[in-house]
Amino acid sequence: MKASEALIFLKDFEIYLAAERNYSPNTIRAYRKDISGFLNYARDKKIDIAVLERRQIRRFISRVREGLRPGGRHISAVSIGRMLSSIRSFFRFLIIEGVMEENPFYGVSVPGRIKKIPTVLEEKEMSVLLAAPDTGSVRGLRDKAILELLYSTGMRVGELVSLRHSDVDVWSSTVKVTGKGSRQRFCYITDTAVEAIERYLERRPKKPEALFLNKNGTRLSAVSVRAILNKHMNKAAISKHVSPHSIRHSFATIMLSRGCDLRSIQEFLGHKDISTTQIYTHISTKRLKDVYDKTHPRAK
């Protein structure tokens, strides 16, 4: 199969991503750029993609590393990994359409790519952080509710700021979260988070539909949540450099260390693929090694 023939299916793939996967225009545009980059390369090299070999894929990756993009700019391993993921998804689509029988990009990864283990807070540090807001004011009640909700659900900061107060069901202790690709899930929230939200809702203006408001009475932004976290990290005298996403990592890591299985963590976090959740097994292993080094008498 010629690459030029596969290019014909690219538009159908874009329609599939929009209609079936509910991907955003920006995401679809990134997919198109990655896939057309490979297909143009294959066309120039006269490669039959129906019988694509691993050595040909390795050569393509090498060309990308050298600067296949205009200007010969350095391309990171993360960007190359994303490109391979896009191409792999396209070939999977061709299999669904009956055009291909096998996915030549299945199992292909970026050589030497090392996943960075994110910064996490320990349980004691989280307890100190959650106690930092001064709940004598509406702003303090809001900050307390934000931190409690982030920690009890592991939701993304973008998901948090898009919440409406109608998304929270205090009776069932759940919150409806709209994640990436507009996929919705229900997250459980702790009793302390429920109490914090209720106390905040009692004091904040009733009219706006957004759950968390800024000083002007409009929806809080993700940037503001980061500033709120930094403020209370300083107050709690925690020196780690963290972001709201670090609380998400902390949630998953602590749940895993307490015996939660990886599949459940995948559901809690709203990960589409279990491979995305695998990073937390590395964190857990590192934590176990640290504990071993600190506690075994002959480990030092």
Image (cartoon, helix red, strand yellow):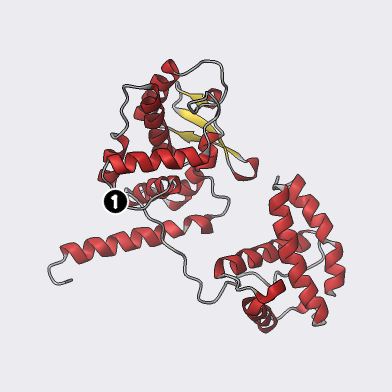
- Neighbourhood count class around disc 1 (C-alpha, 10 Å): few under 14, some 14–19, many 20 upward: few
Question: Which corner quadrant of the image does residue 49 belong to?
Answer: bottom right
Residue at x 29% of width, y 35% of height:
132
Residue at 56 percent of width and 70 percent of height: 77
Question: Does the rendering let one see residue 1?
Answer: no
Residue 50 at x, y = what percent? Answer: 79, 75
Give the quadrant of the N terminus: bottom right
Residue identified by numbered label 1: 239
Question: Left or right: 167 with respect to 70?
Answer: left
Where is the C terminus found, in terms of image quarters? bottom left
Q: Nearer the viewer, residue 116 or 72?
A: 72
Left or right position of 255 against 182: left
| Residue 71: x %, y % from top left | 69, 74
| Residue at 74 percent of width and 71 percent of height | 38
Question: Looking at the image, which is closer to me, 263 or 227?
Answer: 227
Q: Is residue 226 visible?
A: yes
Above or below, 146 against 58 in this view is above
Name above or below for residue 154 compared with residue 199.
Answer: below
Expressed as whole percent of the image width and height from the top left, the position of residue 239 reads: 29, 51
Rendered view: 206 above or below 101: above
Residue furthest to the front: 216
Q: Position of residue 219 (x, y in %)?
A: 55, 29
214 with respect to 34 (left or right): left
Q: Give, as a three-letter code, the residue at label 1.
A: Ser
Residue in the foreground of this view, choosing between 222 and 287: 222
Q: SS for tag 1?
A: loop
**How many numbered marks does the figure carry?**
1
